[in-house]
Amino acid sequence: MSSSNPSSSKREQLLNTALVLFYREGYHATGIDRILAESGVAKMTLYKHFKSKDELILAALEARHARSLEYFRAGARLPPREAILAVFDSLHGYLQQSDFRGCAFIHAAAEFHDREHPIHRQAAEHKDFIERFFHEQLQRLGLAEPGKLARQLQYLMEGVLVMAHMHGPADQALEAREAAEILLRSAGL
């Protein structure tokens, strides 16, 4: 039983190193040798856990998604209007982190632009999850047809990520929060 802990620990080391490097430098630009050197893990160990670099990227994206899932689940416990606006408050905090480099999922979709590629599909699934979050909150508020407004809220969020990445983080999320409030009010919410 204790032998599984070191194996799990090495897998986490690889995954955490890959998460940082992929996010900071890009998926294609980050080579396996660099991940191995920075993680201190042997190549055999890498291939024991991940059959390919693509599999490692998929695992890294899944780990990022799991972190987001925790946040959105916590937000779903708030009253729905607050949950929607809290997304923008949290996003503002995220932009202020010193290692902010944009959205890992947008980067993945851009680098793996074929919509049928598993990495692109996984990035798209993450974005679908966010739209569903907004959709569910709007349903909780009693909006009969929340699809369009859910997408509009997501467009605000995605625009924040892109513009903060392109121009540097500032108050994009706070300004988008104001726009979200206007959209909610105009929907009678």
Image (cartoon, grey):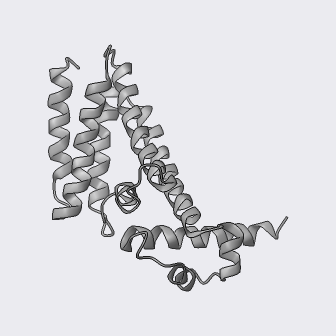
Judged left or right of residue 189, residue 124 is right
Q: Position of residue 187 (x, y in %)?
A: 20, 20
Q: Is residue 147 above or below residue 88?
A: above
Residue 79 visible in image:
no
Q: Is residue 93 above or below residue 37?
A: above
Q: In this view of the protein, which residue sits in the foreground, 16 or 123?
A: 123
Judged left or right of residue 163, residue 55 is right
Q: Quadrant of residue 189?
A: top left
Q: Is residue 36 above or below residue 124?
A: below
Q: Quadrant of residue 135?
A: top left
Q: Position of residue 158 (x, y in %)?
A: 27, 47
Name the residue rendered at 33%, 15% in the picture: 142
Q: In this view of the protein, which residue sits in the foreground, 89 or 130?
A: 130
Of the 4 image quadrants, the one containing the N terminus is bottom right
Q: In this view of the protein, which residue sits in the foreground, 126 or 188?
A: 126
Q: Quadrant of residue 23?
A: bottom left
Q: Position of residue 14 (x, y in %)?
A: 59, 72
